[in-house]
Image: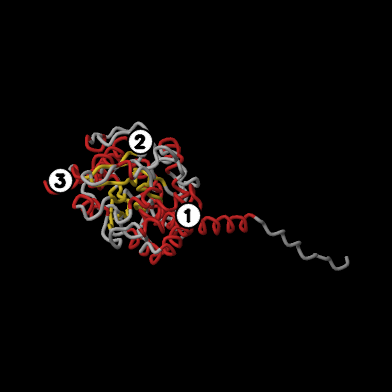
Amino acid sequence: MGPSFNPTPAMPMPSTQPVRRLVTVVRRVALAALFAAAAPALHAAEEPVLNLYSARHYQTDEALYANFTKATGIKINRIEAGDDQLLERIRTEAAQSPADVLLIVDAARLWSAQQQGLFQPVKSAVLAERIPAALRDPAGDWFGFSSRARVIVYNKAAISPADVPSYESLADAKNKGRVCTRSGSHPYNLSLVAALIDHLGEPGTEKWARGVVANMARTPRGGDTDQIKAVAAGECGVALTNTYYYVRLMRSTKPEERDWAAKVGLVWPDQASYGTHLNVAGAGVLKHAPHPENARRFLEYLASDEAQAYFANGNNEWPAVKGAVAKNPELESLGNFKADPLPIAVLGRNTPAAQKLLDRAGWK
């Protein structure tokens, strides 16, 4: 017999199962690591906390915040400062900012914050339904929760209300030496002028502003309360003020302040044309809010009937929500008036032009 031949046994094909198991394990480990890394952020978003930056300094707001916490279990951590200080703080903190909501006063400031990219859009059926379109940003970046009117007050003993039926009448020759006002750079005046730009155009508004400057009884100074006091004292005949300052004096516990209010009358400007200028206090959810869901819930709470009553009764402002009840006899005593329907967002867009115009007119 010839030699026998025993060939080398064939090597078995390697199984793919161990490789698949390895890939699966790697994927699971990677996903676990991803969720572990995200867990703190997810947990933070679910914490019952809201960090609020507020430019409102009213004691009555304390009850508003306390009731939100009672209703939701969400604790409010609050920092209060001036509008400009808060905006600067948010810019400095950037992505590290702990703030969830910015609550500030005046459309010009809300617009400025929006232009700086500080807000994120909020999608809420509640807010879309309850806050009128004219009092909120179309993109949902901010919402107005209360409104106030910029009116003309006059000295009852010296001036006829017929002399100041409109904002434009403040520039009439008959009112030379009569007008008191605060600074032209203050947002309350900037927003009014921004509205006038929309109604009169820039050339017409600048002509008006130059006329007001020519009619001033003194260099612009002080706040709205100071303007009312000056009118009551006869230092000037007429002045611009926001309505809640006037009502605050009416409700004051100090006799001398109630006396100031009693000596001045109030005119709703431009009832025969476009109506009296309105402004808002409003809020938005900040771009880097660590608790965006809590922030949305807070904004929706501000639109509730309960919160709207706090705005009206606590700081003498009108509720933004139609039908919200205000139990404020002094505010209600002002009566009804025709409000300018101009969307609040327009005021912000016109504010830079308004400031340049007032600078050119010499309204310091």
Question: Disc 2 designates what residue?
Answer: 337
Task: Please tell me which residue lies in front, 306 or 42.
Answer: 306
Q: CA distance from mark 3 to mark 2?
A: 25 Å
- Residue 147 lies, in percent from the top left, at 35, 43
Q: Nearer the viewer, mark 2 or mark 1?
A: 2
> Dot 2: within a 10 Å radius of its alpha carbon, few (fewer than 14), some, or many (20 or more) residues?
some
Residue 129 position within the rendered picture, expressed as x and y whole percent measured from the top left: 44, 35
Q: Amino acid at mark 3?
A: Asp
Q: Position of residue 49 (x, y in %)?
A: 31, 50
Q: Which residue is mark 3?
A: 259
Q: Residues within 10 Å of mark 3 (few under 14, many from 20)?
A: some
Describe residue 173's horizontal placement relative to residue 67 as left or right. Answer: right
Q: Which mark, residue 350? A: 1
Q: Earlier in the sequence, mark 2 or mark 1?
A: 2
Residue at 15 percent across and 45 percent down: it is 259
Total marks placed? 3
Image spot of residue 2 (x, y percent): 88, 67
Q: Is residue 302 visible?
A: yes
Is label 1 or label 3 in front? 3
- What's the amino acid at mark 1? Asn
Question: What separation in Å lies between label 2 and label 1 (alpha carbons)?
Answer: 25 Å
